[in-house]
Every structure is written in structure tokens, then in C-alpha cells.
Image (cartoon, rainbow, N blue to C red):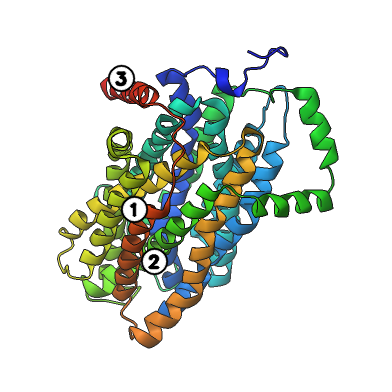
Amino acid sequence: MSATGVINENAKPRLSIGQLFNMSFGFFGIQFGFALQNANVSRIFQTLGADLDKIAILWIAAPFTGLIVQPIIGYLSDRTWHKFWGRRRPFFFAGSILASLALFLMPNSSMLWMAATLLWMLDASINISMEPFRAFVGDKLPASQRTTGFAMQTFFIGLGAVIASLLPYIFTNFFHISNTAAEGIIPDSVKYSFYIGGFVFLSAVMWTVFTTKEFPPENIKHWEEEKLKSKGLSKGLIEIVKGIGSMPKTMLQLAVVQFFTWIAFFSMWIYTTAGVAQHVYGTTDTTSKSFQDAGDWVGVMFMVYNGISALAAFLLPMLAAKISRRFTHMVCLILGGAGLISIFFIRDNHTLLISMIFVGLAWASTLTMPYAILAGVLPANKMGFYMGVFNFFIVIPQILAAAILGFFVKNVFHDESIYALLVGGISMIIAGFCNFIVKEDHNETSKEIIEDIELLKTLDRV
């Protein structure tokens, strides 16, 4: 405890399971919305008449909004403090309201441009809520508990995505709600899924907002003086540019890994529905039941990789304690890449679920290991900003993929979208091997990592 009565970086208390639950539960709602977006937006675009080679460019809204929004939100959240709302929670609150509204509106799109515009709104809103959650872990947890904190987030990310991905399939097969509709109309099974998503997103984020408190800046007076110095749009932009230019080396090393990783995931999100419909179900007709069944099955596939991610979240820190975080990440990405490549050779829809098990390992590691490595090398007073900047290395490869994948699918792969997944798998394997260049901060002792593992074992028994 510092002289000001504020907990400093070296004296942060280790949190209980209940406290970790409360601070991470909001991610359940965020990922609920994110999973509905990933599994269904390409399906919505095609239903509203989008050509196969245009889907990727329509998706550019998602990474482009992240490129703009996340560093700004990170910068602003670092400079926000309110006695009741705290530092990060105002952004959780605002983003959840906007994202929930977008989720209610998206399945009622009547034209392609409307759906594309709502994707911009949805993704921007998710970003407003999501990135401060990453900084939240760095704010509240001591170094020895950060891997567990990110693993807890990954668990809720996986759990939310499992349920959200399955919803259209459940509505169709258990509640007999139609998954087909007239040309240009989004099926009721998808509509109801998005409505539930809007409610869950708002409710889960509000749980975290109202059950979790934040630590104030360690030296309020100094923090306020620094805030005044950087006040104003031009000064803020200058500081953002300077901050980007002085990124820690570890962030730049992880950037290479992230670049190839996110080309792979973006390829999967864009083209799995079209690829599975064409490659396994033998159709490109969006009005046919076979195409909509393929869309439902892609939801099941995405449920599997997210479910594996939720389970693996609590096993990866144990593996990382033995072989390091970077080698854990390398192994998971290589296995995930092999899983994506295997989709190209499979013609049975049930066998595709095996492929997604390996993708789930890669997803769990991607949501945990890079952030756990990064949090240890970032200055505490710029945690939100640098977490936002780190997002550059997620969205830039997605923008590149959105710009070129459509061309390759049409002109090189002759409208065989399954080849985009093959490219994604190769890219993910490259990302895995790029972990050789990453240097970790070894300030955390073996004793501290073991304490993390013991906490995870406790959670397994709860």
C-alpha cells in the first residue's frame, strides 16, 4: 500500500476465484455477440445477395473499425478515472449498450448495405467493450496471477461462443424454427439467435460493471498533472504516435506471430460457411435447405473449437509452466494450422468436428498466451493504450486478407472457397514457428507460476 492509500503495482492482492469470475464474466457476453457475428455474418451477406468474391471485402468493416477504435479507447481509458465508474468500466458500459442494439438490428437487415453498415456498428461497439477488458487484467492482477486472469477470460470467451454458435442449430433442430426463408430474407432461427445475443451481451457486461471495483492510479496528483499535459486532440494524437514508436521489443516480436495467426482465423470466419456448403453439402444456392443446413453445421463446428478453447484455457498455463508460454503457443498454433488444412481433405460433416478440436487449441492459446507474455513487459500507466496498439497486429492482417482473399477465391481458386481455409492453415503453421523469435520476460518465478496452477486446480473443483 502506498502513502496515498492506493495499492501499488508490487502490492496488488491475489484475487479469489469469485473475484476472478466477476471481473471476467463480461467476456461471456462479449464473446456471445462476437461468435454470432463470426458464424453468421457471411451467411447473412450471402442471403442478402453478396457474391462469393465480395464477402471478404464486406468483412473489412470488422478489422478497420478495430484499427481505429482500439488504440483510441485504450488511450482514453488510461486517462479516465471516476470514483464510482473507475477507469475501464465506463467503456464496458457504453460499448455493451451499442453492441446490444446492433445485435437486435442486424438480422432485420433488408438490404446488403444495411447489413454491412450494422457490421461496422457491431464491431466498433464490441471493440469499445473488449479491449479495456484486456487492460483490466493488467490493472487488477499481480504478475503471478495474470496468466490465470487471461485464462479465466478465455474460459468465458469459449463458453459464450459455444452457446452462441449453437443457437441457430438448436432453434432449427430442437424448437423446429425454420432456417430457411424467401430469397433475401434472413431466417427466423438466425433472427432469434441475435435477439438472445443482444440480451446476453448487455446482461453479462453489466454483471462485471456492477460487481467489480478498480484501483485508482497510484499517485492521483501526478496522474492528473500528466493527464492535463496531454489534454487536447492534437496532443493526444502526438502521444499515440510516440507510443507506437516506442513499443517494447516483445510486442514487435509477437506482432509477427499475430500477423500470420489472424490471417488464418479471418480466413476461417469468412469462408467456412461457403466452403463447407460447397465442399461437403454440394450447394451454393443460398435459398436451399442444404445451404442453410451447412450454415447451421458451421455453428456446430464453431461451437466445438470454442468449447475446446474453454476447456484448454485452464490446461495451457500448466503446460506453459513446463515449456514456457511461447513454446506452448507454438505447439498450439501448429496443431491448429493442421486442423484447418485437414478441412480441405474431409467430405463428411461429422469428421469436420475433429479438425475443429485442433483449431480450438490454437484459439485458446491465441486468447491467452500473447497477452500473458505482453502484460509482463508493458508500463502499468499505459496498459490500455498498448493493448489497443497490440490490436494493430490483429486487424492489419485481417484488412490484408479482406483485400486479397476475394480476388484469390475468384481468379486463382475459381470460386472454390475451401482453398481459403487451406491458405489459413498454412498461415497458422507459419505463425507457430515464428514464436522462436519471441523473448519472454522471466520476472515471474516458478513459485508464482505454481501458485497460478494451484488456483486453477481449485477452480476445476468448483
Q: Nearer the viewer, mark 3 or mark 1?
A: 3
Residue 392 percent coordinates (x, y) = 56, 57
User: Which of 449 and 103 lies nearest the eye of the viewer?
Assistant: 449
- Determine if residue 261 is in view: yes
User: Based on the displayed image, in which of its 4 quarters is residue 212 positioned?
Assistant: top right
Q: Could you tell me which residue is drawn at 52 percent across and 28 percent down?
A: 207
Cβ–Cβ under 8 Å for marks 1 and 2: no
Q: Identify residue type, mark 1.
A: Pro
- Determine if residue 176 is in view: no
Q: Could you tell me which residue is drawn at 31 percent across and 21 percent down?
A: 454
Helix, strand or loop at disc 1?
Answer: helix
Q: Earlier in the sequence, mark 1 or mark 2?
A: 1
What residue does disc 3 label? 458
Q: Identify residue type, mark 3.
A: Thr
Helix, strand or loop at disc 2?
Answer: helix
Mark 3 Cα within 10 Å, few/some/many (few <14, many 20+)?
Answer: few
Q: Is residue 185 above or below residue 206?
A: below
Q: Is residue 412 above or below residue 377?
A: below
Q: Is residue 435 above or below residue 373?
A: below
What residue does disc 1 label? 168
Residue 360 percent coordinates (x, y) = 29, 49
Mark 2 Cα within 10 Å, few/some/many (few <14, many 20+)?
Answer: many
Q: Which mark is residue 247?
A: none
What residue does disc 2 label? 267
Cβ–Cβ under 8 Å for marks 2 and 3: no
Residue 142 percent coordinates (x, y) = 50, 24
